[in-house]
Amino acid sequence: MSEALKTKILELFKNQKTGTLATIQDHKPYSRFMLFFHDDLTLYTATNKETHKVDDIGQEPNVHILLGAQDANFSGAYCEIEATASIEDSKDKKEKYWDDSLSKWLGGPDDPNYVLLQLKPQKIRYFADSASKAEVLEL
């Protein structure tokens, strides 16, 4: 693994919290904006366990994530991430990744409907900007 590439990816994960998560729903891709957290290269995102995305992942755990390039000119770095998703329901992780902005959808870290999606990357394509060639990290 290229440590230089990993460092660039982790810096992007640290600075870009909002991105898209795509699942497969009825044999078609379905994307939605999510708030992402990370522990090394593993990403986490909060959701209500009664959502379609949880059902989608139960049927097909392979997901796609886009993070970065959020300025108006798409000039910043971004990542395209192929990952495998699973449900994370541990109290420790839910407390660690709770963010008050989630209170629009969830009642707090003890909400029984609050779960995390754990997203383990298989391949990360890092682009320095929209005109650059991808650097690829395979895990």
Image: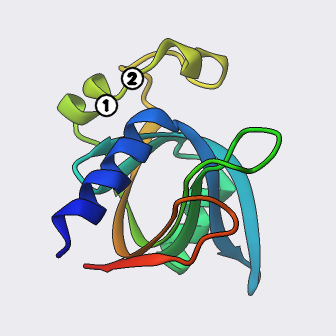
Q: CA gap, disc 1 to disc 2? A: 6 Å
Check disc 2 and report the residue beneath it: 98
Q: Note whether 109 is above or below 45 in the view shown.
A: above
Residue identified by numbered label 1: 94
Instruction: For the C terminus, give its image quadrant.
Output: bottom left
Q: Is residue 76 left or right of residue 49?
A: right
How far across and down, in percent of the image, does residue 86 sit?
37, 63
Element at label 2: loop
The picture places residue 29, in percent across and down from the top left corner, at: 74, 76
What mark, if any, has residue 106 been given in the picture?
A: none
Q: For the point 35% across and 69% down, which residue is it?
A: 121
Give left or right: position of 10 versus 36. Answer: left
Q: Give, as a three-letter code, the residue at label 2.
A: Trp
For residue 48, which quarter of the picture? Answer: top right
Q: Quadrant of the N terminus?
A: bottom left
The amino acid type, in three-letter code, at marker 1 is Lys
Q: Are marks 1 and 2 in contact (CB under 8 Å)?
A: yes
Instruction: From the viewer's perspective, tell me whether residue 130 is left or right of residue 99.
Output: right
Closer to the camera, 121 or 72? 72
Residue 88 appearing in the image: no
